[in-house]
Amino acid sequence: MLDQGWSKGAEAAGNFDHLQKTSEIDKLPGVAKRPKSRHRSGCPVSLSLEGFGDRWSLLIVRDLMVRGFRTFKEFQNSGEGIASNVLADRLRKLKEAGIVIAESEGADGRRVYYRLTEKRIDLAPVLLELLLWGAQHEQSDASCALITAMSKNRDALLAEVRRRWQDRDSTPLIPRFDADVARNLAGRRRTS
């Protein structure tokens, strides 16, 4: 049992031995230690954002999910302008969070392919809605025709994302969103 020699008189006299003795509470049977939380809060949104909520991590997840990117070099050349040290850090954090796995190529063990884990392919509906929301509310280089088609065919698009993940198919599902692609799509619509 605890030594309870820490009466009010002892406190008043400046005896603070009780502060050391109260740490013995953790050693009592049936008293669970409160685990140190590594999370800001228990909010599901906050917990989700801790794993992949920064700009670069979301773009890496996007590239894995719909652009078919699998290598460091592909991510670096995505057109987003991510620095190599930031990319390496985000890939490491995504691996630690269980969002991506890194697989070495059999013939060349130095070549690493990244892949979303199964629980993170479930982010496809969230990412699709974020893409559609951004295209609706912000001026972007995304083709209006592509966005409309994606919006009208959400279920088919999500099924295709999952199929490609299951089959390890790295064929890009959507084009790169940049001004050149948008101009080319617009030019094709005018000539059609």
Image (cartoon, rainbow, N blue to C red):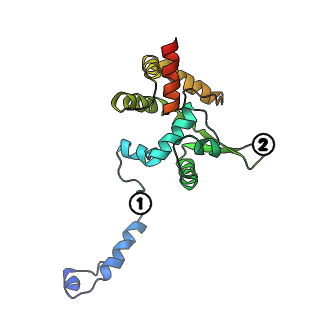
Q: Tell whether 138 sits left or right of 143.
A: left
The residue lying toward the viewer, choosing from 121 and 62, is 62
Kind of residue indicated by mark 1: Lys
For residue 3, say whether it is visible: no
Question: How far is disc 1 from disc 2 in space, using C-alphas?
Answer: 40 Å
Q: Position of residue 190 (x, y in %)?
A: 48, 15
Q: Tell whether 117 sits left or right of 13.
A: right
Task: Check disc 1 and report the residue beneath it.
Answer: 36
Q: Position of residue 181 (x, y in %)?
A: 52, 28
Q: Earlier in the sequence, mark 1 or mark 2?
A: 1
Residue at figure coordinates x 42%, y 20% from the top left: 151
Callout 1 environment at 10 Å: few (<14), some (14 to 19), or many (20+)? few
Q: Quadrant of residue 1?
A: bottom left
Residue 192 sits above or below residue 110 on the image: above
Residue at figure coordinates x 56%, y 56% from the top left: 85
Q: Position of residue 106 (x, y in %)?
A: 78, 42
Residue furthest out toward the top: 192
Task: Check disc 2 and report the residue beneath it.
Answer: 106
In front: label 1 or label 2 = 2
Label 2 residue SS: loop
For residue 89, say whether it is visible: yes
Q: Quadrant of residue 43?
A: top left
Callout 2 environment at 10 Å: few (<14), some (14 to 19), or many (20+)? few
Residue 33 sits above or below residue 19 on the image: above
Q: Position of residue 71 (x, y in %)?
A: 65, 42
